[in-house]
Image (tube, rainbow, N blue to C red):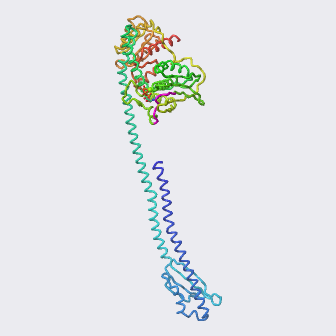
């Protein structure tokens, strides 16, 4: 509750209590004092009238003239008090006698009759001033007011001051929190920028390295050299997977990935997992059992595959004996996709940390061959994107289970299987004329060597004008364009593709290659609608992309 909301309520309560105190004190005092005075006067009046009645009975004819005796009866036993007078009247209401001075008004009067042989022969009036009582009441009222004010202060001012202090402290804390968040966001932004810049610069040589290494391994026949080349290729692949993880997380952070939901059967995805991770598990002498499933789920197939891949890679990696079981179980209107392993397990206090970026339980030396610690961070970002929640249960040395659930889908089998298509056919690009536009000489050379090796007729240019000139000289219309996104002098691959399409009046299949992970560039590329590959592009991926491009073009 905010201070502004609480203050009027507290003021009201404090005010009401203060008024009650300020009023009840004088009113109470007056009531009690007045009642006790009235009782005293009534008793006195009764007592005196009794003694006077007895006196009259003794002297029925001469009582009105017995001044001395009457004076005694009016002033003694009890003695006459200050501020009071007692008056005796005859039956005709004439005053017989009075004792004491006339009290200052206002007065309290008590009247009792006096008798002679049972007949009323006069009356006694006892009058007492209540001026002093009123004065005392005024003092008590003053005291009451002061007490009321003190109560008001105690009830309103002090709690409000404490509340204000607490609110101020809270505001201060919120401010510090906001500042810390702003600093963290700024740091995160700088991290993304650094990542974008570094990854672009690193990707370029990595990309060429991959192309050269792949070309080399296709050409080398000497088994000894081949062994070395295979090792180079393995390192390039490892590096590529690290890069791709970094890129994935940057893309997810940049918000350029939007879920593309559809109903799809899970089994083809499971089959790919068996093919991709079965051999690795067999090599480690553990079992990878992916239970066949007829489930159709409603989700984004690529994102679900990415999540599942990361979970299975971990399960296989962190299991030394026993095995890994993957399954898809119905749970109400959803399917629970689960990855069980009998591996090293995770201590309870680490369970909520493993989803943090770069967090690894068993890699304090940060050996990059043991990964980056991004696999589960990617899983977490995807689950947030899809609105899922991955649950983990684990017991150290016994194993772990990771599960997430996705809604059931409609039982329609999707015609296109974007992730299922495999392009092993080495001849897909044979004799096709492919224009490469890239401002890096090494990349151009690498692509030329690789695509040349697949039987392509390659035109390599470093810019749009260069490409136009070379195509003109070549005297053959291109069958495909592969353009780097970021070219020299602010030109982009998107412009190259659009200009070439306009120039040749044909929708030539085109592919963008980018090493950029800056959010606005990624968005730009996505919005262009052209298929894209991220550097470093492995030869297998390139072949697959070319196959899809030609296949799609032939269908049109
Ligand atoms: N199935 C599992 N069994 C035991 N530990 C696991 C399992 N899955 C994840 N972990 C622990 O969680 C940590 C984080 O996992 P994450 O997948 O994010 O990173 P990584 O596997 O170490 O590296 P990367 O996935 O980037 O190659 C791992 O380092 C590991 O300690
Ligand atoms: Mg991992």
Residue 341 part of the magenta-drawn span: yes
Residue 312 falls left or right of residue 195? right
Q: Position of residue 126 (x, y in %)?
A: 55, 82
> Which quarter of the frame holds ligand 1?
top left
Residue 46 is drawn in which quadrant?
A: bottom right
The answer to whether residue 343 of the structure is visible from this angle is yes
Front one among 262 and 44: 262
Relative to 382, does residue 546 appear above or below in the rendering?
above
Residue 334 part of the magenta-drawn span: no
Relative to 303, does residue 223 appear above or below in the rendering?
above
Image point 36% across, 27% down: which residue?
194
**Magenta: predominant secondary structure element?**
loop
**Range of residues picked out in magenta:** 340-348
Image point 41% across, 45% down: which residue?
171
Q: Position of residue 489 (x, y in %)?
A: 34, 19
Front one among 430 and 13: 430
The answer to whether residue 465 of the structure is visible from this angle is no
Residue 290 is drawn in which quadrant?
A: top right
Q: Residue furthest right?
A: 118
Image point 63% across, 87% down: which residue?
120
Residue 210 falls left or right of residue 311? left
Residue 519 is drawn in which quadrant?
A: top left
Residue 143 falls left or right of residue 295? left
Number of disc labels: 0
Q: Position of residue 413 (x, y in %)?
A: 58, 19
Q: Position of residue 135 (x, y in %)?
A: 47, 73
């Amino acid at each position: 509750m905010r201070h502004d909301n609480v203050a009027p309520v507290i003021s009201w309560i404090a005010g009401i209590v203060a008024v009650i105190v300020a009023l009840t004190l004088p009113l109470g005092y007056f009531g009690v004092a007045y009642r006790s005075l009235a009782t005293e006067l009534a008793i006195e009046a009764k007592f005196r009238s009794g003694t006077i009645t007895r006196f009259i009975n003794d002297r029925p004819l001469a009582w009105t003239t017995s001044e001395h005796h009457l004076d005694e009866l009016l002033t003694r036993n009890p003695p006459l008090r200050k501020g009071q007078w007692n008056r005796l009247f005859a039956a005709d209401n004439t005053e017989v006698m009075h004792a004491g001075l006339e009290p200052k008004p206002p007065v309290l009067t008590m009247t009792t009759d006096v008798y002679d042989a049972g007949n009323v022969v006069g009356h006694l009036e006892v009058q007492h001033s209540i001026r002093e009582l009123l004065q005392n009441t005024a003092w008590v009222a003053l005291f009451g007011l002061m007490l009321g004010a003190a109560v008001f202060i105690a009830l309103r001012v002090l709690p409000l001051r404490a509340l204000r202090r607490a609110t101020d402290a809270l505001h201060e804390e919120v401010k510090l929190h906001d500042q810390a968040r702003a600093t963290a966001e700024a740091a995160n932004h700088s991290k993304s920028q650094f990542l974008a810049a570094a990854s672009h610069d690193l990707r370029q040589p990595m990309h060429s390295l991959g192309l050269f290494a792949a070309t080399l391994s296709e050409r080398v026949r000497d088994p000894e050299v081949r062994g070395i080349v295979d090792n180079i290729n393995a390192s390039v692949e490892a590096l590529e997977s690290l890069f791709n993880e970094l890129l994935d997380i940057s893309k997810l952070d940049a918000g350029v990935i939007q879920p593309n939901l559809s109903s799809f059967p899970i089994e083809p995805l499971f089959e790919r997992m068996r093919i991709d991770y079965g051999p690795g598990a067999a090599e480690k002498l553990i079992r990878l059992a992916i239970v066949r499933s007829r489930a159709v789920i409603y989700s984004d197939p690529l994102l679900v595959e990415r999540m599942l891949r990361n979970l299975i890679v971990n399960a296989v990696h962190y299991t030394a004996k026993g095995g890994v079981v993957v399954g898809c179980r119905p749970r109400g209107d959803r399917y629970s996709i689960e990855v069980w392993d009998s591996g090293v397990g995770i201590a309870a206090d680490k369970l909520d940390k493993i989803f943090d970026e770069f967090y690894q339980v068993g890699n304090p030396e940060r050996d990059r061959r043991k990964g980056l610690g991004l696999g589960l961070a990617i899983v977490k970002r995807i689950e947030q994107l899809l609105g899922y929640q991955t649950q983990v249960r684990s017991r150290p040395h016994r194993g772990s289970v990771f599960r997430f659930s996705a809604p059931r889908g409609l039982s329609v089998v999707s015609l296109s299987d974007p992730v299922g298509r495999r392009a092993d056919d080495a001849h897909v690009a044979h004799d096709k004329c492919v224009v490469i536009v890239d401002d890096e000489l090494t990349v151009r050379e690498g692509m030329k060597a690789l695509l040349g090796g697949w039987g392509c007729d390659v035109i390599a240019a470093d810019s749009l004008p260069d490409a136009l000139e070379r195509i003109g000289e070549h005297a053959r219309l291109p069958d495909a364009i592969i353009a780097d996104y970021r070219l020299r002098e602010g030109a982009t691959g998107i412009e190259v593709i659009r200009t070439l399409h306009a120039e040749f009046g044909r929708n030539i299949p085109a592919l963008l290659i980018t090493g950029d992970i800056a959010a606005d560039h990624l968005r730009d590329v996505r919005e262009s609608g052209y298929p894209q590959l991220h550097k470093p592009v492995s030869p297998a991926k390139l072949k697959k992309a070319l196959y899809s491009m030609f296949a799609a073009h032939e269908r049109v």
